[in-house]
Amino acid sequence: MILSASNINFSYKKQKVLNSVTISVPEKSFICLTGPNGAGKSTLLHYLFKNGTIDGKHFSSPKERAKTIAFMGQSESSIWDYSVRDFVLMGRYCHTNNSGIYSQNDYMVTDSVLKQVQISNLADKSINSISGGEFQKVRIARCLAQEPKFLLLDEPVASLDFSYQEEIISILKNLCETKNTGILISIHDINLAARFADTLALLPKLSPLIMGTVEEIFTPENLKKTYSSDFKTFKHPIYNCLQTCI
């Protein structure tokens, strides 16, 4: 099963953002998307969620899409004082009959996801009383409650401290490996992307994706084409992966 979109061209108010971009996300793939500000990373994720096809076939309804693809934007807030459990439970809505009544299985899946993301201790707390890092984990848990085949996350570790970045990306990587989930995340930190990605996708402004394994893609030439700066690459002595510096 592959989530894909081909030859994407997109503009905001006549301003071109994406130019001939093609992307494929297979099951059990962990893809990190990175590039400069304004290159269209968020636009690409939104487009793939709304218009992507599964093995070339379109979805019959929004609920069918939600059963297959979960999407998480960069930021979110709520005027309602939900508990963490109820907030995560909302991810199960696509599996209901639109009555707003959740089944016993929906509650079981919710509690299982809370445990998987290691936030069971927060279940009865208000989403407005937890930290930013904890709320990111809650939002990811709500996505997982959908039991999707594909997960699209826009900057899931932005503005989080180092320990939360490591923890959240490790949780996502484990999900990819154990549940065969195809995961595409956008991320600003190119070294963090290179550490964790199975596939790296560089998005230069108004250019097609440069996509492949980290060893194939993480070169001074590709980085300069993407960021318009000169880079050096080196093998990290501890992580044993390619990293870069200017």
Image (spheres, rainbow, N blue to C red):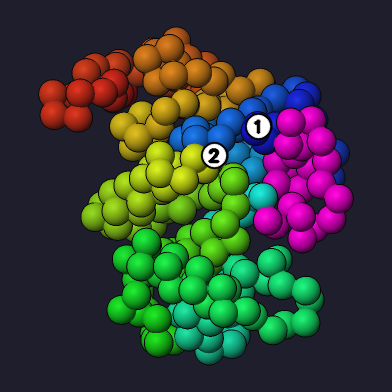
Q: Residue 2 carries which label?
A: 1
Instruction: Check the image and report above or below for 179 versus 80.
Output: above
Question: Which residue corresponds to the image point at 29% horizontal and 17% vertical from the top-left?
Answer: 233
- Neighbor class of circle 2 (other Cα within 10 Å; few <14, some 14-19, many 20+) is many
Q: Do the residues labelled 2 and 1 touch (CB within 8 Å)?
A: yes
Instruction: Check the image and report above or below for 117 versus 84.
Output: above
Q: Give the range drawn in magenta.
A: 46-67
Residue furthest out toward the front: 104
Q: Is residue 191 visible in this depiction of the protein?
A: no
- Residue 59 part of the magenta-drawn span: yes
Q: Is residue 193 visible in this depiction of the protein?
A: yes
Along the line of sight, which residue is nearer the eye, 150 or 127?
150
- Quote the CA–CA distance across marks 2 and 1: 8 Å
Question: Which residue corresponds to the image point at 81% horizontal and 47% vertical from the top-left?
Answer: 59
Indicate the quadrant where residue 41 lies.
Answer: top right
First in residue order: circle 2 vs circle 1: 1
Amino acid residing under circle 1 = Ile
- Where, quadrant-wise, is the N terminus in this rendering? top right
Instruction: Check the image and report above or below for 216 versus 241.
Output: above
Q: How many marks?
A: 2
Kind of element beneath mark 2? strand
Instruction: Check the image and report above or below for 143 versus 239.
Output: below
Along the line of sight, which residue is nearer the eye, 110 or 241?
110
- Neighbor class of circle 1 (other Cα within 10 Å; few <14, some 14-19, many 20+) is some
- Residue 44 part of the magenta-drawn span: no
Question: Which residue in the protein does label 2 denote?
Answer: 182
Amino acid residing under circle 2 = Gly
